[in-house]
Amino acid sequence: MKLNNYYLFLVVAILFLGCKNDKTDSNQTDSNVIESNITDTNLKDISELSYIEIYRALFVDNNGGFDAHGDLYGQDAVSYLSISEESSSCGNIMYLSNTSKDSITLALKSSFNFPGNPNKEMLRAYQLPPSEKISIGNSKLCYNGKAYNIKKEITSAGFNSN
């Protein structure tokens, strides 16, 4: 009877460890798939990148504002905004500053020309509190060993009506 209990315990232990190892391998496989997808995206030709892939490449630290269309906010607050730059390994890091005492909502256009890609610009909206400075991406996109110029332009800016 003792021997049967021993075998039963051994079978349960093997099944438990086998399932646990399968789960670990599955997680590692999922991680490898995710990593290979990121690698595949990085190796795509620039002409094949979708709008969202370009967005992710341009705004790697989630500083891309929210999607905007048209002249949304007028021109009243444009003179209170300034763009400054700091040197980086790929072009310059660009910053947007609000010199006003009021919050400003603005639209910022990023223009680019990636050979063969139909996407040529992105218009993103931001809310910028008084005296704040935020990163708005780089002046260049370094991708697959090449550098592409990115032009930033404030298309409209108005004071928040709070």
Image (cartoon, grey):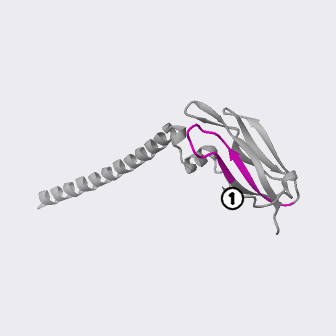
| Residue farthest to the bottom, as pictured | 162
Say if 75 sits above or below 83 in the image: below
Residue at image coords 73%, 44%? 152
Residue at image coords 58%, 37%? 115
Quadrant where the N terminus lies?
bottom left
Q: Position of residue 19 (x, y in %)?
A: 29, 54
The amino acid marked with disc number 1 is His
Residue at image coords 57%, 30%? 145
Q: Is residue 55 magenta?
A: no
Say if 112 sits above or below 69 in the image: above
Residue at image coords 64%, 51%? 62
Looking at the picture, tell me which residue is in the foreground, 15 or 36: 36
Q: Which residue is mark 1?
A: 69
Answer with left or right where residue 62 lies relative to residue 15.
Answer: right
Q: Position of residue 32 (x, y in %)?
A: 41, 44
Q: Secondary structure at mark 1?
A: loop
| Residue farthest to the left, as pictured | 1
Looking at the picture, tell me which residue is in the foreground, 12 or 154: 154
Q: Is residue 109 in view from this perspective?
A: yes
Q: Position of residue 58 (x, y in %)?
A: 63, 44
Looking at the picture, tell me which residue is in the foreground, 117 or 17: 117
Give residue 95's quadrant in the image: top right
Which residues lie in the magenta part?
102-123
